[in-house]
Amino acid sequence: MGLKEQIQDQAQDAGFDLVGVASAEPLPEAERATLERLRSGMLGGMTWITEDRVRLSCAPPRLLPSARSVIVLGKGYLSREPSEVDRLDAPRGRIARYAWGEDYHDFMPPRMARLMESLAAGLGRRPTSSFFVDSRPLAEKAVAVRSGVGWFGKNGCVITRGHGSWVLLAEILTDLELEPDSPSRRDCGRCRICLDRCPTGAIVAPYVVDARRCISYLTIEHKGAIPLELRPLMVDWIFGCDLCQEFCPHNRAVPSVVDSALIPRAAVGSRPALIPLLGLDRRAFNRLFRGSPLLRPKRRGLLRNVAVALGNSRDPSVVPALTDAMADEEPLVRSHAAWALGQIGGPAARLALANALSREVDESVRAEIRQALS
């Protein structure tokens, strides 16, 4: 068995579904496209994505001078939705599928380490390597396409054979001299379903996503107030968004996977009840979401999203919970709770807003309350 075949077998043993090999040469086209998005402002408030970081992410030799190859790994994450969705007896929120279980930043690296340990045992030496799982600078989608694992979809996702775009990516830069795989020649053809069905119009052109309008960006990376015109379009999404993937024809026949790291966490599920989330204090929030991707927007960001989803429910029964949220320690939560009360309307909601206005000192929240009352 050749070295590449060993890598493929051992990657499967380590818990990965897809394997490809790319050269470690620079990625000039990815650098050009990403710099263009950055300079146009389409990356929104992701201030850590600087021009220097973009150039670094597209230059594998700078990330590991001895690198000769990139091992690209994919993990399918389309797990089965639990039966809880059949009994939506209270307003509930939607979570992007990749975040139903454990944080992939935590469970992927040990699997990558297991793969490299197996290779080291067979080679009689430990290859020099460096792991990348999204949070470190490497243009992973461009590398994945170069490796043949998949091709660029018009929604910005990498679409693979067998798992569609429901794939988590990870990469190992290594000094192993491996024969590269051929890039996939497939594409989306004339299909534009994802562009037409995106509720916020975030996919502004084929392969071009304006993060500032993307529900995933707004609910996770965006730190401030969600633009008023976009709040109703978020419907019940409280973390991420899967709509462009759900509409994609390449995802219709993708089988569900069974992996303990990806199944919905028992205390949260895939569609958690919203009112209990709105009542979480800081300690309870950290305890409930320990090890989960939902920690990323922090308590203030997630409760902001929950308030928007409650407002979009237009359910008068949530007014007491939103009234309590008008006393939250975070102005961001209070402002979005005010908007939600305005969306629901009615005497109880108006009374809660008027009472909150009489004691509110934060001007941004006061403005939201006045807008809700009007």
Image (cartoon, grey):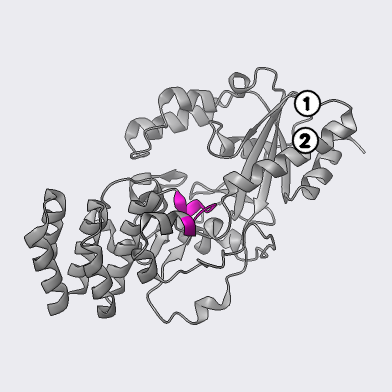
Check the image and report above or below for 342 versus 183: below
Across and down, in percent, residue 305 comes to: 34, 59
* Marked residue nearer the N-terminal end (2 or 1): 2
Res 211 visible: yes
State the mark number for residue 127: 1
- 292 part of magenta stretch: yes
Work out whether residue 6 or residue 244 is closer to the camera in this orientation and state it: 6
Secondary element at image label 2? helix
The answer to which of 146 and 112 lies nearer the viewer is 112
- Quadrant location of the C terminus in the rendered image: bottom left
Camera-side residue of 359 and 343: 359
Q: Secondary structure at mark 1?
A: loop
Q: Position of residue 373 (x, y in %)?
A: 10, 66
Q: Residue at x 35, y 70 (%)?
A: 275
Q: Is residue 69 above or below residue 167?
A: above
Q: Tell me the residue at 36%/33% (across/down).
A: 47
How packed is label 2: few (under 14 Cα within 10 Å), some, or many (20 or more)? many
Q: Are marks 2 and 1 in contact (CB under 8 Å)?
A: yes
Q: Residues within 10 Å of mark 1 (few under 14, many from 20)?
A: some
196 within the magenta span: no
x 68%, y 65%: residue: 255
Horizontal side of 364 relative to 209 (left or right) equals: left
Q: Amino acid at mark 1?
A: Pro
Q: Which residues are magenta?
A: 287-295
The residue positioned farthest toward the right in the image shown:
1
Question: Residue 246 appears at what percent x and percent y?
Answer: 52, 63
Q: Which mark is residue 333?
A: none
Residue occupied by mark 2: 116
Name the amino acid type tagged 2.
Met
What residue lies at 66% left-to-right and 65% top-to-bottom? 256
What distance separates the C-alpha of mark 2 from that of mark 1?
8 Å
- Quick one: quadrant of the N terminus? top right
